[in-house]
């Protein structure tokens, strides 16, 4: 990645931002995956939505990439989502990038169960 990672807070993260962390809502929701979206965890806090897009464009057409941020500080929560055009592209991203380091942090990538 380039000096883009040193970007100011404005524009750093995607539009999803905010939200508490509790996770209790996810447990109550039924799974409903389209198979098109992945969740990327263990990201450096400096990662932007554009960084995610640039990384995952290597395996397919990225429809949307969001680095999720704290609403009050704008700092990344260390995870994000990437939506692909096809299921095959999402699977290629999982197989090609799970465990690969981004700024010395191995990314943890799984299919989003709730997209």
Image: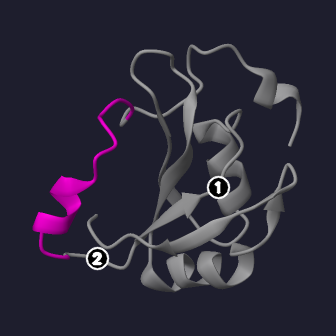
Q: Secondary structure at mark 1?
A: loop
Kindly identify the residue that appears in the image at 63 percent across and 75 percent down. 93
Front residue of 70/96: it is 70
Kindly identify the residue that appears in the image at 51 percent across and 86 percent down. 88
Q: Residues within 10 Å of mark 2 (few under 14, many from 20)?
A: some
Pointer 1 with pointer 2, Cβ within 8 A: no
Q: Secondary structure at mark 2?
A: loop
Q: Position of residue 108 (x, y in %)?
A: 63, 68
Region of the chain picked out in magenta, as a range: 17-31
Front residue of 22/33: it is 22
Q: Is residue 48 magenta?
A: no
Q: Position of residue 40 (x, y in %)?
A: 56, 60
Q: Is residue 20 magenta?
A: yes
Residue 32 lies left or right of residue 7; in this view the side is left
Q: How many marks?
A: 2
What distance separates the C-alpha of mark 1 from that of mark 2? 23 Å
Considering only vertical position in the picture, is 14 above or below 37? above
Q: Position of residue 42 (x, y in %)?
A: 64, 55
- Report the disc number at residue 34: 2
Considering only vertical position in the picture, is 66 above or below 4? below
Front residue of 72/33: it is 72
**Magenta segment, prevailing SS (helix, strand or loop):** loop
Kindly identify the residue that appears in the image at 12 percent across and 74 percent down. 30
Q: Quadrant of the N terminus?
A: top right
Q: Position of residue 77 (x, y in %)?
A: 53, 39
- Report the disc number at residue 42: 1
Kindly identify the residue that appears in the image at 35 percent across and 29 percent down. 18
**Dot placed on the residue nearer the N-terminal end, 1 or 2:** 2
Q: Residues within 10 Å of mark 1 (few under 14, many from 20)?
A: some
Q: Quadrant of the C terminus?
A: bottom left
């Amino acid at each position: 990645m380039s000096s883009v990672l040193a970007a100011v807070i404005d524009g750093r993260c995607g539009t999803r931002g905010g939200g508490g962390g509790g996770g209790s809502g996810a447990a109550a929701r039924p799974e409903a995956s389209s198979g098109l979206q992945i969740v990327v965890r263990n990201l450096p806090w400096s990662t932007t939505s554009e960084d995610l897009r640039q990384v995952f464009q290597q395996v397919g057409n990225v429809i949307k990439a969001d680095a999720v941020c704290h609403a009050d500080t704008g700092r990344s929560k260390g995870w994000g989502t990437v939506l692909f055009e096809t299921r095959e592209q999402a699977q290629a991203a999982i197989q090609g990038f799970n465990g690969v380091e981004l700024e010395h942090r191995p990314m943890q990538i799984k299919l989003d169960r709730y997209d």
